[in-house]
Amino acid sequence: MKKRFVMVATVLALTVGTIAGCGGAQEATQENVQTESVQETAPAAETENSTQTAEIANPWVDITEEEANELCFRLFKAPEGATVKGWSKCESLADPDKAVGPLVQLSFTMEGTEFVARAQQGASEDADIAGLYYEWTVGPEDVTLANWGGGNMTGKTYRYVGDAEFVDLLTWYDIEIGIAYSLTASDKDLDGFDIQGVVEQMYAGENEAFADMPEDFLQEQSGITSFASFDEVIAALQQGQGYAYIKLMGCDEDILAVTDLVFEADHSAYEASLYKMEDGKAKMIGLASGNGSAFPLRYADGILYGGHNHLYETYVISQEFGSLMMMDYIDDGVASGSNEFSGFTRKENRLDVEAQDFTGTEEDFQKLLADRETKPIVEFTVVK
């Protein structure tokens, strides 16, 4: 089964700051801008190796708009009247093992204002893809975008007001597919400027066709991306695959979990696609996973438990979108080699309530894992 979406110098020199790497940036000062405006002349004795090193330091690669659309299912477009400076990608932030794609960037100008738009498919909801390090003068402020997400997609705006420049930022997230977006605007004066209006102009309805692409193993193997009922979902399963009904916090109705691999010993599974009835259709709302037969999916009191011996995950249904969301995500850092805890916990199934960083100890983490093991496994009915 496909895994779920879960989280250097740039080619573009913004007046808002010096971009460091694919995602990082440093706040610009007048001294920085003056320094950057001076073009250095390479010494006559510069070697071929030093030239190659300079080229390697730049992780951005120019691409076409068509290539950009292949890297992100629901990509934006340049707004009407904009002058496109170029499309590019940064592969160094991609993680194929976690279904995280490269960072895609569009740079353009409009009425003298410089813009940089970015998107990354598979990025986590809290991913900082804009890479700006400012002490924001205003924000974050919540906005709801027209047309994006059927008019229900929320975002956050920020503004920096400096002595010589303004910087506006809007970030938003497509929770249905798992895509992080950002738009940065910079100019000497942005008083009265509406960055939200620009983002709404960047919506590309023609890219909605990609929403009909297979979202999980079942849709891929059956060729069906829209199911009228749970019965149709189950009917599309093949021999050896399985299904189970559960109820999750945030939804009063049954949730249907389907999996392409059921362990014979206890009818458990370590991965499942979750389907929910919505607008008269069975809609795939997310993927949950454990790790092999040793760490199957478990369920109790409206919470679905996943993860393994180095990862603790819990899933519920979000109040805002009715889709699968993580209540808890805690990693002990062993897999990454950091050996440091990272992640978050939530007390409510609401995305508008900020998650709390996990600050517990090894003992606290082990208690969570031990408690998870006491929860009943999800037992799947096997298709004969």
Image (cartoon, grey):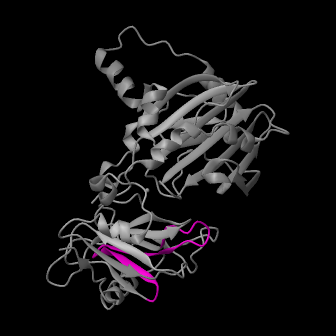
Q: In the image, 292: left or right of 128? A: left
Q: Is residue 239 magenta?
A: no
Q: Main secondary structure of the magenta part?
A: strand
Instruction: Name the foreground residue: 275 vs 85.
Output: 275
The outermost residue toward the right is 192
Does 221 appear above or below 102?
below
Residue at the spot 57% in from the left edge and 44% down from the top edge: 130
Instruction: Name the foreground residue: 1 vs 209.
Output: 209
Quadrant of the image occupied by residue 299: bottom left
Give the x, y percent position of residue 369: 33, 83
Tell me how many marks there are.
0
Q: Is residue 325 magenta?
A: yes
Q: In the image, 314: left or right of 119? A: left
State which region is magenta.
301-326
Does 87 appear above or below 357?
above
Quadrant location, the N terminus: bottom left
Give the x, y percent position of residue 381: 25, 80
Residue at the spot 27% in from the left edge and 79% down from the top edge: 380
Does 249 appear above or below 320?
below
